[in-house]
Amino acid sequence: MSHSLSLARTTTERVLHATIFEIVANVLVFSILIVFASAAPTQSGVLTLVSSLIAMLWNYLFNLFLTAYRHALASEKGYWQGVFMQELSKQGYLWC
């Protein structure tokens, strides 16, 4: 018996996953900036919000492109392809 998994995620799923991750990350970064860097709460809040929005936009666009690429090739993600795509994604974060 053969089962096929859909590679595509809905926009709602993508936004939900990114939002949950960013909320957790923002709470941690906000707390660390206030405690260890003695930053003002307003300054920390603005910094975490802006960086979060940039990261969410990049993540959404990159994953949308990746899904389209996989569908165009009709291939499943292999181990090395996954490693390469993760590295490409991280490089995008560094350059944004």
Image (cartoon, helix red, strand yellow):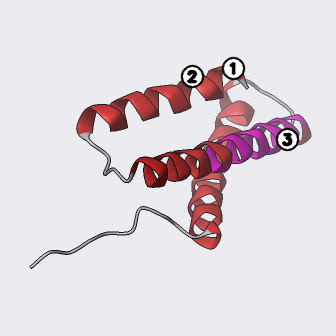
Q: Quadrant of residue 36?
A: top right
Eyeballing the image, is 58 above or below 22?
above
Nearer to the camera, 31 or 48: 48
Labels 3 & 1 near each other (Cβ < 8 A): no
Under circle 1, the secondary element is helix
Residue behind mark 3: 41
Instruction: Estimate how packed mark 2 is, as few (under 14), some (14 to 19) or many (20 or more) residues with alpha carbons within 10 Å.
Output: few
Instruction: Estimate how packed mark 1 is, as few (under 14), some (14 to 19) or many (20 or more) residues with alpha carbons within 10 Å.
Output: few
Q: Position of residue 57 (x, y in %)?
A: 73, 46
Quarter of the picture holding the N terminus: bottom left
Asked if the stretch drawn in magenta spans residue 57, the answer is: yes
Query: Which residue is at 32% across, 46% downward?
Result: 77
Residue behind mark 2: 91
Identity, as a three-letter code, of the amino acid under mark 2? Gln
Residue behind mark 1: 95
Query: Which residue is at 63% across, 28% downward?
Result: 93
Q: Position of residue 27 (x, y in %)?
A: 66, 50
- Residue span colored magenta: 43-60
Identity, as a three-letter code, of the amino acid under mark 1? Trp
Query: Which residue is at 87% across, 40% downward?
Result: 46
Q: Quadrant of residue 28?
A: top right
